[in-house]
Amino acid sequence: SNGGLRKKRSTVEHGIAWVLSEVRTQLEAIADVEGVPELLDRFPECVLLGGIAARRELVAALLGEHAVAASAAALLVAPGMRQPVALELRCGAEDFGPANGPEAEAWLRSVAQAAGQALGHRLKVDALRLRLSAMGCANLDVIDLPERPGAAGASPKIEEMRQRHIGSPANLLVCLEPGAPLELCRRFDPQLKRTVLIGAAATAAEAGGDDALPASTVCGPKAAKELEERFAALCRERLPTWLQHLERLEIRLSRSQKEARDLEQRESSEEVLRRARSAGLSFGRALQHVISGAPGCQAGALTLEEELTEFAAAARKGQCETGDTSMGHTTSAQEASAAAEEVFSSFNGVTGYAAYLRDQVRIPAADVPLNGGAAWTRLLAEIEVAMRLAHPPQKELE
């Protein structure tokens, strides 16, 4: 290919990986919806486990096994990475020409700029997701985890990354070397049912089983092709389950959308005004019945003395603040309490005042428990007496 990215990979079902990317993109846009994060966790990824050289070699083979791919793999799998790097590798129609051409160099610069976000000094648990598309590229999703810093053991964040990605039952574990990487696979996958052995790990394994790829001394194109086919087969196997969950999600979102539209319609200005008018009309119709009272109803019925006793208690508690806000005149709770006490004190208390109203003024039905309109009419008569006591005629003052 004269150093160009022209090698066309013949794979099974290129389309399913592109569909996976499109579905993931749409779901990540609504990741705050209930059930969506769990659905995203069901999508498989290939977690690379091994030394940095072996991981670079495999990523280069997945990218297309050419000079630019090797340079890109060195940028993507670097010692300074401090967060997981999730690669969505997709075979596209992009032909960048020679490896040292302007298009290939521009693509390589974009990879370096994107991968540079994962470099630094502090570990980050959340993955940096990159989508790379090129002619000859494999179609699968890969997770590359940061290397363990130092020999003192894994930090809590490294352990959290492992639990999230290696411990996920949806992911494939790609073991590239025997020893520590294989032991890590056995820790999270004791039966090696979702572990794929490649390169030196496959050669050193005593029994690979059905899930092990053929041994290869290097992680080259053959291993990359078979891993891609394994990933596509896994996607096809889980596709019915994904569709079921997506259909349930669609039904739930449609229901939520309908409820939101109904709520929006109910809360529109026209609807609020209509309900306010309806409530006003209902109150207007009911007010006459409340004022008139209902025959035989004794709810809240009080004698005049009982009403005055309740009023005196409320005034002492400071609950009788009144005022005419439209005219700017107000009566504080203290002023109302003092005025009531002044009236009652002239008759040696509430009981004496009630006896005066009953025996001398002869307010109708003073001893009868009343409510509704009848109680209101009696209250107006008592207020008239209180106002006359507070403002005696000029002749009496002279």
Image (spheres, rainbow, N blue to C red):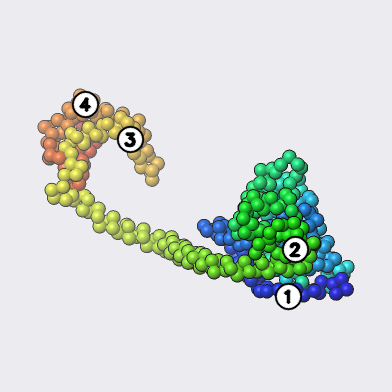
Q: Nearer the viewer, mark 3 or mark 4?
A: 3
Per the image, the residue denoted by label 2 is 215
The x and y percentages for residue 271 are 40, 63
The x and y percentages for residue 327 are 38, 43
Along the line of sight, which residue is nearer the eye, 357 or 14? 14
**Image point 27% across, 31% down: which residue?**
313
Gap in angstroms between the C-alphas marked 2 and 3 = 89 Å
The x and y percentages for residue 136 are 77, 71
Question: Looking at the image, is mark 1 or mark 3 earlier in the sequence?
Answer: 1
Amino acid beneath label 2? Ala
Asked if residue 397 is positioned above or below residue 31 in the image, the reply reads above
Amino acid beneath label 4? Gly
Gap in angstroms between the C-alphas marked 4 and 1 = 105 Å
Amino acid beneath label 3? Gln
Per the image, the residue denoted by label 4 is 349
Mark 2, other Cα within 10 Å: few <14 / some 14–19 / many ≥20: some
**Image point 18% across, 28% down: which residue?**
351
Per the image, the residue denoted by label 1 is 10
